[in-house]
Image (spheres, helix red, strand yellow):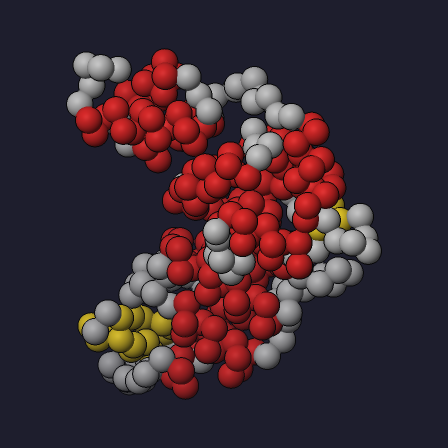
């Protein structure tokens, strides 16, 4: 490693610290990704590796530190203490990634099996190792495949026990958190529409379809096809006249073309919505 430049040496050291990999493996992963750390993490974690050794006694001690005094699980107060120890805001999206790794069934709760099993799979048995893994878990949100898995996981994780749908306020909060990461330009308009016009719980179908809509439809909506879309998404687009500075223009008596007008990044956009 002495032959490497300082920047490359720093990346090797950072990679080894976060993953616990050897110098040889770190070099192989970084070279395979052209020295991009995020790509190197993907290379490393896409390959089968022996599970990192974790000390069962240390895991038990960690669990007992955060366990609720009246129930055999970690609840909201314990998670708040954990976040404080990790120096992470409880509202930070990385805690959703942590819950995804732990396969947590419910928001603000970790069973012993979820907590211990999740930490073992991450090779964590101390707070120091936990803190070191936070940057990697944050980087996973940049991977489209992992982001989709985390997004789909979030629906079941955030909904109330026994409910099939996700409460509207909770769904809006989750969308704002998730799409802040992906920077979907219509997320605020979508949330405003739901509050003003929908005012119902969100189904799993609508939750899933919105991600595909946000990922595949151009912000100008020029390539949008309403066929097969959730009725809520269709209603959102046809109700923009009340929420997104929409104007309707008749281009000619026959046929009648309706254009959607809205402002995107300070630019006026016109997009065909339907013809009849």
Instruction: Tell whether 267 sits left or right of 14.
Output: left
In the rendered structure, the answer to whether residue 201 lies left or right of residue 33 reads: right
| Residue 156 in view | no
The foreground one among 165 and 41 is: 41
Q: Quadrant of residue 169?
A: bottom right
Quarter occupied by residue 23: top left
- Classify the position of the C terminus by image quarter: bottom left
The answer to whether residue 116 is left or right of residue 97 is right
- Most foreground residue, 37 or 47: 37
> Which residue occupies 57% across, 62% down?
206
Would you say residue 20 is visible in this rendering?
A: yes
Front-most of residues 176 and 114: 114
Q: Quadrant of residue 114?
A: top right
Identified at 41% across, 74% down, the residue is 189
Position of the N terminus by quadrant: top left
Give the percent coordinates (x, y) of residue 200. Answer: 63, 75
Look at 47% across and 46% down and name the residue there. 147
Residue 55 point in image, percent of width and height = 65, 26
Instruction: Give the number of callouts.
Output: 0
Position in image of residue 135 (x %, y %) = 41, 41
Q: Is residue 4 left or right of residue 139?
A: left
């Amino acid at each position: 490693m002495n032959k490497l430049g300082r920047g490359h040496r720093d990346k090797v050291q950072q990679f080894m610290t976060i993953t616990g990999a050897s110098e040889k493996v770190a070099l192989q992963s970084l070279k395979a990704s052209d020295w991009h750390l995020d790509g190197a993490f993907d290379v490393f974690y896409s390959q089968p590796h022996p599970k990192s050794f974790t000390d069962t006694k240390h895991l038990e001690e960690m669990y007992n530190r955060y366990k609720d005094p009246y129930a055999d699980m970690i609840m909201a107060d314990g998670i708040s203490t954990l976040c404080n120890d990790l120096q992470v805001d409880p509202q930070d999206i990385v805690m959703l990634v942590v819950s995804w790794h732990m396969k947590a069934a419910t928001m603000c709760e970790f069973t012993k099996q979820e907590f211990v099993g999740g930490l073992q799979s991450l090779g964590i048995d101390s707070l120091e190792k936990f803190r070191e893994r936070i940057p990697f878990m944050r980087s996973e949100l940049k991977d489209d495949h992992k982001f989709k898995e985390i997004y789909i996981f979030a629906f079941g994780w955030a909904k109330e026990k026994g409910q099939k749908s996700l409460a509207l306020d909770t769904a809006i909060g989750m969308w704002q958190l998730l799409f802040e990461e992906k920077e979907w330009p219509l997320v605020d308009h979508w949330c405003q529409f739901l509050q003003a016009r929908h005012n119902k719980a969100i189904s799993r179908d609508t939750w899933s379809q919105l991600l595909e809509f946000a990922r595949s439809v151009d912000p100008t909506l020029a390539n949008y096809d309403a066929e097969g879309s959730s009725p809520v998404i269709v209603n959102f687009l046809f109700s923009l006249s009340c929420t997104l500075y929409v104007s309707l223009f008749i281009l000619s008596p026959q046929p009648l073309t309706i254009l959607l007008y809205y402002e995107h990044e300070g630019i006026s956009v016109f997009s065909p919505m339907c013809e009849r």
